[in-house]
Image: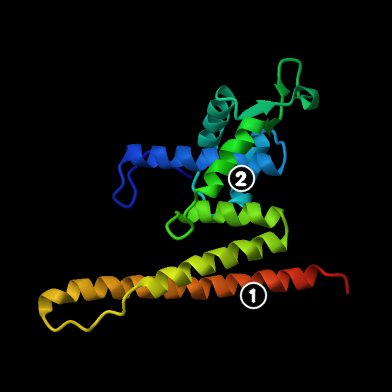
Amino acid sequence: MHDARPSDGRSAEGERVAAAASAKWGVLAFLRWQPVYGYMLAQQFESVFPAWDVSPQALYDALARLERKGLIEPVPEEARRISSRCERTPYRLTEKGERELEWFLQRLDLLEVPREYFILAVRIASWNGSDAVLTLLDQLEHRVTARLDALRPPRRPERLHQLGDWLFVKDQQHHLQGRLSWIQDAREAALDLTAAELPQ
């Protein structure tokens, strides 16, 4: 779970900012899928977004902020009374929240995006069916291939001081080639899952 201690060289403040951003987009995505009670969101968030490191407290804080900004709203008609003094009310995405999430998704650079946001994009696509997932992977493959083709093949360095520049380009190439391999694995897995769901 998330805490205030620095991790991987990041400051405690940087950790809190990252957690708040992850919680915001994760909550909006979750509520696009379905309205949900706050306690259920805290229970289910980790299973829906297993790569995310967001604490239950960060999720509750995000719900309060998002409601104040008009991005989510309570659903009073679905409130559930659990005692004479306590009532639980689910939240749903507002039209403003839907526009905010769509704006974010359209501007995601899937080549540079942190893994949490990439998982979010794949998860949202999966809610729209296998075609949406395959389209997302095709778009990413096209961009990775274009980026790889744009890299000029590095010449082996002739002087020691040229080694760093050569290694930088080689590192970019290996990274992009690895991403292409990953995309192919993801596509094969998606196709296998789609085939398994077809009626026999």
Residue at disc 2, secondary structure: helix
Single out the residue that lies furthest toward the right. Answer: 200
Q: Is residue 42 visible?
A: no
Query: In the image shown, does 114 or 36 lie closer to the viewer?
Result: 114
Residue 60, given in percent of the width and then of the height, sits at: 56, 31
- Is residue 110 depicted above or below 14 in this figure? below
Asked whether disc 1 touches disc 2, contact meaning CB atoms under 8 Å apart, the reply is: no
Residue visible at 68% across and 57% down? 126
The scheme the figure's colours follow is rainbow
Residue 18, given in percent of the width and then of the height, sits at: 42, 42
Return the disc, 1 or 2, that comes first in the chain's sequence.
2
Q: Residues within 10 Å of mark 2 (few under 14, many from 20)?
A: many
199 to the left or right of 98: right
Q: Gap between marks 1 and 2, in whole Å?
A: 26 Å
Query: In the image shown, does 97 or 57 lie closer to the viewer?
Result: 97
Judge depth for marks 1 and 2 and give the one in front: 1
Q: Residues within 10 Å of mark 1 (few under 14, many from 20)?
A: few
Residue on which disc 1 sits: 188
Residue 158, given in percent of the width and then of the height, sits at: 14, 84
Residue visible at 61% across and 45% down? 45
Residue visible at 47% across and 72% down? 145
Dividing the picture into quadrants, the one containing residue 97 is top right
Q: Is residue 151 visible?
A: yes
Residue at disc 1, secondary structure: helix
Residue 195, given in percent of the width and then of the height, sits at: 77, 73
11 to the left or right of 58: left
Residue visible at 70% across and 53% down? 127
Query: In the image shown, does 1 or 13 lie closer to the viewer?
Result: 13
- Three-letter amino acid code at the position of disc 1: Glu
- Three-letter amino acid code at the position of disc 2: Phe
- Is residue 155 depicted above or below 94 in this figure? below
Mark drawn on residue 45: 2
